[in-house]
């Protein structure tokens, strides 16, 4: 899919196109032009859809999910989709529910759904108070979110409550200069967060600058 700089191999073009279709007026799309190029031309922030598979934490979580093969998935604190786009790309039939607490993030995600990605459901919601039934999702993910929370234990309990088989979470493994990071976990406290929330197992591993916990819930 060519653009002025070459090609869009560096983008998740399918989801970028859906975003553009969801955001642009129908009259702008009526001529059949490339939605990604039209989005760029009309000032949409298409950089949100740049490929992130080079991030070790993204590769590690996708690898864990390949072994799990979820039937459906809840992603909390989705943000701008650093994990969501590779997830949807790797699991072409997987129904995914994405939540975020910020209006502009929800609007962006909803535009992608509106633009044709109908297996994506979007809600504005806090992960410390999930409006879903117990065991509502096969797997839940919380990537680079828990370190932002004043009460990560409550969030962990909610994740364990709504997931049937697994919760996968990632956090930074060392201090950084992000003022929004109010929690710092080590391997023991990160795993204990999910055991205390009711998980049966919590396996914590390291990738570059981060920890990933795969918490098992089912018997």
Image (cartoon, rainbow, N blue to C red):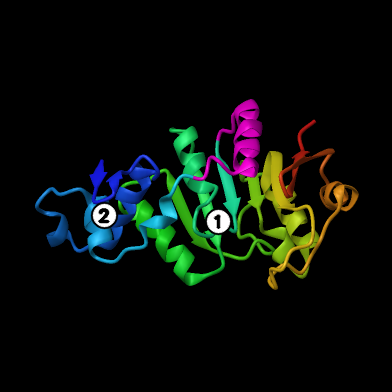
Q: Residue at x 64, y 60 (%)?
A: 130
Residue 162, horizontal then vertical, whole percent: 67, 49
**Which residue is drawn at the image coordinates 40% and 59% (left, top)?**
110
How far across and down, in percent of the image, does residue 40 sit? 27, 59
Q: Which residue is mark 1?
A: 78
Left or right, 118 with reference to 21? right
Instruction: Tell whether 17 sits left or right of 210.
Output: left
Quarter the N terminus occupies: top left
Where residue 17 sits in the image (x, y, percent)? 30, 49
Q: Residue at x 56, y 67 (%)?
A: 101
Residue 185, image quadrant: bottom right
Is residue 54 shown in magenta? yes
Q: From what the image shows, is residue 189 above or below residue 139? A: below
Magenta stretch in the rendered image: 52-71
Give the side of residue 118 with respect to residue 79, left or right.
Answer: left
Q: Which residue is mark 2?
A: 21
Taking the magenta stretch, the answer to whether it contains residue 111 is: no
* Residue projecting furthest to the right: 188
Question: Is the Cβ of the residue at disc 2 closer than 8 Å to that at disc 1?
Answer: no
Would you say the magenta stretch is mainly helix, strand or loop? helix
């Amino acid at each position: 899919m060519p653009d002025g700089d070459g090609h869009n191999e560096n983008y998740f073009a399918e989801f970028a196109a859906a975003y553009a279709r969801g955001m642009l007026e129908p009259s702008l799309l009526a001529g059949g032009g490339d939605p990604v190029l039209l989005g760029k031309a009309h000032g949409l922030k298409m950089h949100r859809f740049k490929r992130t598979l080079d991030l070790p934490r993204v590769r590690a979580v996708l690898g864990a999910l390949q072994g799990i093969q979820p039937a459906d998935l809840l992603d909390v604190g989705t943000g701008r989709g650093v994990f969501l786009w590779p997830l949807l790309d790797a699991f072409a039939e997987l129904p995914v529910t994405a939540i975020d607490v910020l209006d502009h993030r929800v609007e962006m995600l909803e535009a992608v759904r509106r633009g044709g990605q109908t297996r994506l459901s979007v809600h504005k919601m806090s992960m410390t108070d999930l409006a879903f039934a117990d065991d509502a999702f096969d797997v839940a993910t919380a990537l680079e979110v828990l370190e932002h929370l004043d009460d990560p234990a409550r969030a962990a309990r909610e994740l364990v409550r709504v997931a049937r088989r697994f919760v996968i979470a990632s956090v930074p493994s060392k201090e950084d200069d992000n003022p929004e990071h109010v929690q710092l976990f080590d391997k023991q406290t990160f795993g204990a967060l999910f055991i205390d929330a009711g998980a049966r197992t919590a396996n914590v591993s390291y990738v570059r600058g981060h920890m990933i916990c795969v918490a098992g819930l089912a018997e």
